[in-house]
Amino acid sequence: AAENKDWEAHIFEIELYSGDQMISGAGMGIATSDCERSSPDGAFDGDTSTKWVTCSGAKVGKSVTYQLHNPNGVTKIKTIQWGSANNAIPKFDLYCSTDDVTFSYVWTADLGTGAGTNEAISGLAPPPLPATPPPTVAPVCSSWKLEIAAENKDW
């Protein structure tokens, strides 16, 4: 988002949600960034003693990407950032990819000043859960024959 300033940011945690279900965290995906002084994994590990420190200098247009092990829609994000607005990111533009190469804009997360703990809700509904296949149902029959299976050879 164009409002971001020219400094390095300290992001202690980023949580991605689909509805009220958190879909990011340790073991749930892989974080990468094109702007880092420390690994972005520190922002997705559930541990506020670790963090992702962005590159310094111009960061607008730089990003952190979180590749979900189980694809889903992001409708809300929560962040815990440095307590000073001078070292926090106030807005993230969220982009989506189905092939991990081409990304399309979806929504902008407005986190106020970005400082401290904040959340942004998209107003989008979470995607429907994958349809569960109907259970295999036994046929309704008037008679059942139990035939000894051919695998029974030794008796």
Image: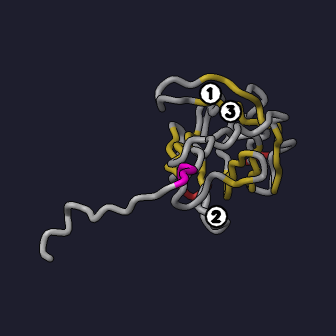
Q: Earlier in the sequence, mark 2 or mark 1?
A: 2
Q: In which quarter of the image is residue 133?
A: top right
37 or 62, which lies in front?
62
The amino acid on which the numbered mark 3 sits, given as a three-letter code, is Leu
Residue extending furthest left?
154
| Dominant SS in magenta | loop
The amino acid on which the numbered mark 1 sits, given as a three-letter code, is Gly
Report, in whole angstroms, how far the alpha carbon at label 1 lies from the one at label 3.
Answer: 11 Å
The percent position of residue 23, horizontal first and vertical second, equals: 64, 51
137 or 15, which lies in front?
137
- State which region is magenta: 138-142
**Circle on res. 97:** none
Say which residue label 1 marks.
61
The percent position of residue 99, horizontal first and vertical second, equals: 47, 29
Say which of marks 2 and 1 sits in front: 2
Report, in whole angstroms, how far the alpha carbon at label 2 lies from the one at label 3.
Answer: 21 Å
The amino acid on which the numbered mark 2 sits, given as a three-letter code, is Gly
At mark 3, the secondary structure is: strand
Report, in whole angstroms, how far the alpha carbon at label 2 lies from the one at label 1.
Answer: 26 Å
The correct choice, above or below, for 90 with respect to 98 in the image is below
The percent position of residue 1, horizontal first and vertical second, equals: 73, 28
Q: Earlier in the sequence, mark 1 or mark 3?
A: 1
Tag 2–tag 3 contact (CB < 8 Å): no
Q: In which quarter of the image is residue 65?
A: top right
**Circle on res. 94:** 3
